[in-house]
Image: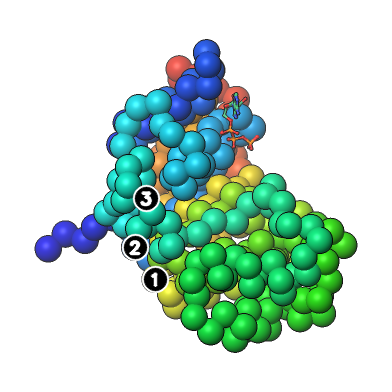
Amino acid sequence: MTETPAILVTDLVKDYGDVRAVDGIGFTVAPGEVVGLLGGNGAGKTTTISMLLGLLLPTAGRIEVLGGDMTGGARFAVLPRMNFASPYVNLPYRLTVFQNLKVYGLLYGIKGIDARIRGLARDLDLEPFLKTPARKLSSGQKTRVTLAKALLNEPEVLLLDEPTASLDPDTGDFVRAYLETYARESGCAILLASHNMQEVERLCGRIMIMKRGRIHAEGSPADLARRFGRASLEEIFLDIARAPSEAAS
Ligand code: ATP
């Protein structure tokens, strides 16, 4: 029997007025797979993730998450089984970290929410600032809280938009190690948009490189290295980014 993909995207298009942000992409992510989404500024990564969450409606194409159509009513059955983290999403700033996580936990209908928060606080080193209002957090602390929020409901699909963007090298490494273990132990499918090549090489079994709304290259880090005759993902990324658009694939 073939396994239902965690994420199945077909012929996906998104136009903002005259701007075609996503231009007919298709891909799958299997349960337990960690897939990297790379691309320069404006390539269409955030737009893709927003459509996967059902926050933006596609102009055309189809998105299924855990077998449910995210553009239709099935979305409401699927959303409790998925989650996302982005440093660009603001937490309610007057609430403490604990209160923030509790509100999200209650929205997700999580049983034993206090124990779940305490467990995540221990794992992600949030204990020193659980009682701090969100407005007083440093951006690195906020990023870790956002990640805890994303893991509250033990998601089967996790969308991460630059999860370590504002972290110092030590904390970034800690979060990457945590995600590596989480992905291995939970069987969660993860789509990771990032500008950090080492992060993507470390965490992702497969990588998709977007440019101007299209996927220009896809494969394991080793496949891509062979195909492009390059030693590092950074060199491959630069080859694609700097090639004239039509020649990039
Ligand atoms: P970055 O790495 O800079 O975050 P990205 O790959 O996430 O970039 P998107 O934010 O998805 O890229 O943007 C894709 C394209 O869509 C860009 O040309 C951008 O200017 C445009 N765009 C994004 N959001 C909007 C919007 N709300 N209205 C109009 N155009 C938008």
Which residue sits furthest right? 136
Which residue appears at 83% of the width and 66% of the height? Answer: 133
Q: Is residue 165 left or right of residue 73?
A: right
Secondary structure at badge 1 equals loop
Q: Which residue is mark 2?
A: 31
Quadrant of residue 178 within the rendered picture: bottom right
Q: Is residue 164 positioned above or below 152 on the image?
A: above
Asked whether residue 226 appears in the rendered view, the answer is: no
**Marks 2 and 1 in Cβ contact (< 8 Å):** yes
Q: Crowdedness of circle 3 by 10 Å Cα count: few (<14), some, many (20+)?
A: some
The numbered mark, 2 or 3, whose residue comes first in the sequence reads: 2
**208 or 55: nearer the eye?**
55
Which residue sits furthest left? 1
Give the residue type at disc 1: Gly
Q: Which residue is mark 3?
A: 75
Front disc: 1 or 3? 3
Q: Which residue is mark 1?
A: 187
Which residue appears at 36% of the width and 45% of the height? Answer: 70
Give the residue type at disc 2: Pro
Write down which quadrant ligand 1 falls in: top right
| Label 2 – label 1 distance at C-alpha | 6 Å
Q: Is residue 99 left or right of residue 212?
A: right
| Label 2 – label 3 distance at C-alpha | 18 Å
Q: Crowdedness of circle 2 by 10 Å Cα count: few (<14), some, many (20+)?
A: many
Front disc: 2 or 3? 3
